Image (spheres, rainbow, N blue to C red):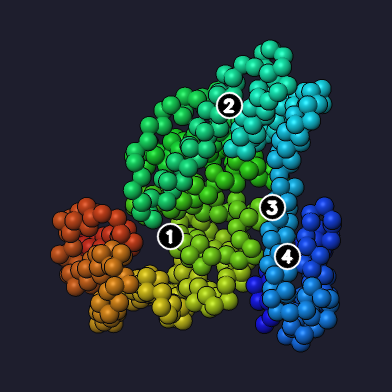
Amino acid sequence: MHLPKLVKTLQAFDPTAFLRLKEFVNAPYFKVPKASVVLFNYLYTCYPKFTVRKVNLEDIAQLGENLSTYAKQSAAASKLLDGIDLFLACEQWQRNNKAVQRYTLAGFKDMQWVDEFDKAYENELAELDQTPEQDIDSFYHRHILTELAANGFSAKLVRTHKNNLVPVIQTLDEFHALKKLRYLCEVFSRQWMGGNYPKQDVLPLLDILKPYNRPEHPYVYLFIHVYLMLSADTYEESTGPYNVIKQFAEQHSEGVLPKSVLESMGYAINYALRWFNKGFETAADEYLWWTDLKMKKNVLLEGGKILPISFRNIISLSAISNNNPDWMQRFIERYAPHLPEAHRLTNHAFALGLYAYKCGRYKEAIRQLMIAHAGEETNFNCVIRRWQFMALYNFDSSETETLLNHLDAFEKYMLRHAKQVATVKRLFDKFIHYAQLLIRTSPYDIGETLLLTLQAEEYFPGKQWLAEQMYAKSTNVRRQTSKVRV
């Protein structure tokens, strides 16, 4: 393809944006070179399919002397790409009304239009005070407005209260405190990804933001509680700030969700998943509560798609939660079609398998989980094998040979893929170990010691299910023995 970089760039535009780009390129104000304008107008007629037959050296050379050679066409394309960069910058600037107002005020200052500046400045501050979401951009905007008012020729010309720099420093401190608090929340949320972050003294930040820690300033209010929730050392300590966030979301769930709720809910979801993975199974219901809210508000999809890992997390937690199976069925029917095509078959079968499991249809669950082979996704394959075993056991716990063979194959699978499953192998090893004890140990020998040993283990997926099966196996035989004695 001739001029491949330029063609690839133009192909990325949708029709509406491409028309705006045409207006931009042809506007003399932006000084796009003439050769680049001619080149663009020709390529505009080729959109959206820039075929080799249309985009070639010979046809473009007929457009004029300034495009007659390969070197001239390449130079024109390069200058056109520079113009596109400027167009994209202008597009972003226009979308940010606060930025437009700030540059307008800066223009008034440069022209020394003092009255116009003062009027626009006061109007902008009044509008900012009425903004429902006092978010990071609002704090930054207030700081820049305050800075504009306190600096420049006109501000220094007349000595008034506007020369006081204390508000400039105060608004800077407030903006910095909120911005840093927001990033500290992100640090806590990403801890599972690693990263050596030095410990921060957050008390000065909270002190600066204290006047805004109330529902009238929802963004600051919620993110202070997001930080307290994420930084808590125990699940019990975290529930207080978590409930504040959840209650606020409940109270503001009518209509369009506020930005503060949309952003904080992502942290609440990760928080619930984190504590569930530490063994607090009630957190599964919290995770699904937020998922349900996102479903109701149509904000679960990203670009019309759902990530396979998000889909699986929701399905897995729903399978062990107190949710009605009907909820799970509705979720699968609504969102399975939005899985990326390459991942759809496996994840859909996995979801149907867990739905059947939750409904007690274990034979159907086994069949669907056999379909859900995850290819190179070794960790996911381990998850599937664990659920398969649980379905097999629930279907017929007396088939000890089949069950032990399944666990043996599970172990061999992890050995063959030791490098890929290194981060999760320890957890699945524990499941296999106790599953083998569940099968091999006589009901009479499953005593309190074995159950206490299992309960004392650090949480691993399937731990609670194993404890329930061991308890049921031991109590059933005691009941039968009691009947015989009677």
Instruction: Please state which of the two labelled residues, at mark 2 or mark 3, is closer to the viewer.
Output: 3
Q: Earlier in the sequence, mark 4 or mark 1?
A: 4
In the displayed structure image, the side of residue 123 where residue 335 appears, left or right: left
Q: Circle 3 sits on which residue?
A: 89
**As shown in the figure, which amino acid type bears the numbered disc 3?**
Ala
Instruction: Please state which of the two labelled residues, at mark 2 or mark 1, is closer to the viewer.
Output: 2
Q: Secondary structure at mark 1?
A: helix
What is the spatial separation of the Cα atoms under label 2 and label 1, in whole angstroms?
A: 48 Å
**As shown in the figure, which amino acid type bears the numbered disc 2?**
Thr
Q: Circle 2 sits on which residue?
A: 171
The quarter of the rendered structure image containing the C terminus is bottom left
Q: Circle 1 sits on which residue?
A: 320
| Badge 1 density bin: few <14, some 14–19, many ≥20, Cα 10 Å | some
Query: x and y percent of residue 416 in the render?
Result: 27, 80
Q: Earlier in the sequence, mark 2 or mark 3?
A: 3
Q: What residue is at 34 percent from the left and 41 percent from the top?
A: 198
What is the spatial separation of the Cα atoms under label 2 and label 3, in whole angstroms?
A: 27 Å
Q: Which mark is residue 80?
A: 4
Q: Earlier in the sequence, mark 3 or mark 1?
A: 3
Query: x and y percent of residue 63 in the render?
Result: 84, 77
In the displayed structure image, the side of residue 199 where residue 141 appears, left or right: right
Q: Secondary structure at mark 4?
A: helix
Q: What residue is at 47 percent from the left and 61 percent from the top?
A: 313
Q: Secondary structure at mark 3?
A: helix
